[in-house]
Amino acid sequence: MEEKIDWGTKEKVIADINSWKGRFIDIRELTPSHDGEKIAAIVQPETRKFTLCINGKLQENLFDRMYSLRFNLENQPICLVYADFQWTVLVGDTMWENGFDMMWNLTLSPDTKSIAVNIRTAEMTSGVCLNDVPWENTFFEASDVVISPDGKRTASHVQIRQREELNIHWFYQKNFTVAVDGKAWDNSFLTTWGATFSSDSQHVASVVMTSDAATYSIAVDGIPWDKEFSGCWEPIFVPGTLDVIAPVETPRGWTLAENGAIIWPYFHQVYSPKVSPDGKRLAAIVVPEVGKWTVAIDGKPWKNIFNQMIFNPIFSPDGSKVATIAKHNNKYLVVVDDKVWPDSFENAWDPVFSPQGDKVALRAEKKGKFFIVANGKIGKTAYEWLWDPIFSPDGSKILIRGIENGKYVRRVLSIDEI
Amino acid sequence: MNEFAIERYLNRIIEEREQGEKEKYVSPYFPEYVREVVPDMGLDERVSQLTTEQIERVIKRVIGKQTARLKSIIETCMHCGLCSDACQWYISNDRDPTYAPVAKIRMTLGEMIKRNFKVDPEFIKFCARVVFTECNICHRCSMYCPFGLDITAIIRLVRRICFILGVVPQRQLDQAQTHITFLNQVWLSQNDYLDTLFWREEEGIYELKNLRIPIDKEGAEILWFPLGAEPKTGVDHIDRFAKIMAVAGVDWTMTSKDTWDSSNMSMFINDYFTMERIVRGLYENAKRLRVKRIVLTE
Ligand code: SF4
Ligand code: SF4
């Protein structure tokens, strides 16, 4: 998609957002398109009537409720909309044919061509609608839809039996499972969460509560590992394989298990594992001592330890580097390969690698203003708000999308120019 | 007492008068333990599905390697009685020694250890009655003990054993189950929760013009997590909170994702992992939305 982005024009002022403020009762979910050429928001031109405003221009349809605005890589807005007591999906200026009693968890495939949403029907059953095609089966409840990497399949956690108020025996009937493309797994569990697809889109893994209310495992396509644990966090598939890795709690502490076998050392806590795109390296958040956080790579913790919080580790596209954000002494820090950048911030978003992996950029807040920070250097321009920076395919330029003096601007700068 | 509680109380007195003397429960293990019979599905019915072997496995799993340490804690007690005077149950039951904190651990975990974990289902029911209905986990006894014996921690271990075995008073078990399955204490589905937020925003505008309940507002100053009951039975609390934030000019948001309920009832039954799931879920929401502060209802 990047080739469609205009990498030549240095600066464009797209819309005067301040002037929108006088036009509408309120402005919600201000969101720029991927190419930076459009800025959209859910606006309220009259009491309890909502529509999209894109680059200052209003769409025609008015809705009673709207939320979950985002853009696809074709730079079309996508939003959940509600009118005449029905929810549906708006893509560009076209609405899906199907409407539902409720829609939530709007989810896009990696190429943004497929759209999946959890739905509730007029009969008060729940399921998923993928690209305007609802699942044939619905369930008593459905939650946390996930979409396969190829965008063709969906999975959701589902409740397969009607609950009876205050009947405490009901829980032990194992009423929860995962449904894939509307078909529930044969096995059901006390509870399930954290479903994920394999990279070939053919398999699904999930955390499951198995024999009693303190026993957990990972099920792959409905079959639990032959090992059980006192806790498990959300599993991941190793790209290009059917191997599943998940943080597990054992009597010796938390660690990582692959297909049920322990593969890492033990820590007070281990979560958010990430595999490098080539599947060779494994990073996770670890707690080496109580109240201290860091990242471990292939089981080895970084030397830098942080005393408040750490965000998810992010691999460079070639898998050679790992970046994250840490909170330490009430300041946000950027950490790349165990090296802490010199500046600290009041807030910082996920680091973004250049396609070659040699550069890192992100948005961060300092003294109430927002800055692009790249390769350890804070940009010159202070913005009122920023979105994530995007690197050009050759990594030489950065697309910046931000609000400056009340106006939405799009800039294309090299790292030295920032 | 609210009016319903008063009504319930009066009904009970009338019922008791009509029935004459209440039926008594005498513990088959400790004859001095005499109480009223209180029927409860969570204690009476769940227990019938247990086996001695299952109970043994769960006790071992919960206390396992700590057995010697726990035994020595129980044996270190000098019966000085200081902890008893700290306990509201003991004081308000005419200083009946079966309500004394140390009796609660001797009669439950102490007995499990003494019998080498081989106890029958009826004994688990007895333990559940003691640890769930005659102790509030207030921790006062532990603070008063001159030897620093942490009685409450032991009572909590017994609660965990009972929870894993599924022998917990009905209401409490119900709340534990909803936290496990829905990550909130009121069985509220993701769609009902979100629907409620939209509905409350619409209702709220009649009291405060253009009221807004922001959902997933990235970078907001405050992320508010209600208590489970608020979007379920106390729905007007949601728009009240929104009104306060609007008038105070605070930049705030709610989350669209689980975990949005700030309560952690799993703590009362020592469901350790669900407790962790709830706390981690709250922080993951704060991280995802990059808010500066979390505000909880309590
Ligand atoms: S923790 Fe329980 S036993 Fe100890 S004082 Fe409080 S109510 Fe009594
Ligand atoms: S205060 Fe401590 S030593 Fe005294 S009776 Fe209680 S537990 Fe035993």
Image: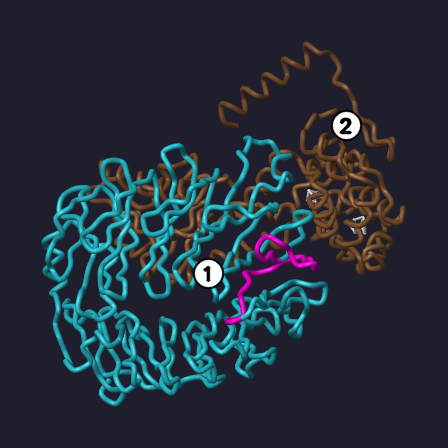
Chain colours: A cyan, B brown
* Three-letter amino acid code of the residue under disc 2: Arg
Residue drawn at x 32%, y 86% is A377
Q: Residue A30: image x %, image y %?
A: 23, 60
Q: Main secondary structure of the magenta part?
A: loop
Q: Are marks 2 and 1 in contact (CB under 8 Å)?
A: no
Horizontally, is B128 left or right of B175 in the view? Answer: right
Residue drawn at x 62%, y 69% is A256
Density class for disc 2 (Cα within 10 Å; few <14, some 14-19, many ≥20) is few
Residue drawn at x 55%, y 81% is A302
How much space separates mark 2 and mark 1, taking CA atoms? Answer: 46 Å
Residue A120, by quadrant, is top left
Residue drawn at x 50%, y 39% is B186
Q: Nearer the viewer, mark 2 or mark 1?
A: 1
Front position in the image: B15 or B94? B15
Q: Disc 1 on helix, strand or loop? A: helix
Q: Which residues are magenta?
A: A218-240
Above or below, B277 against B180 in this view is: below
Above or below, B7 against B26 in this view is: above
* Three-letter amino acid code of the residue under disc 1: Glu
Q: Residue A275: image x %, image y %?
A: 51, 73
Report the residue marked by disc 1.
Answer: B284
Density class for disc 1 (Cα within 10 Å; few <14, some 14-19, many ≥20) is some
Residue A98, by quadrant, is top left
Front position in the image: B32 or A250? A250
- Among the two numbered marks 2 and 1 on one chain, the one whose residue lies closer to the N terminus: 2
From this viewpoint, is residue B127 visible? yes
Q: Residue A199: image x %, image y %?
A: 48, 67
Q: Residue A62: image x %, image y %?
A: 16, 44
Report the residue marked by disc 2.
Answer: B35
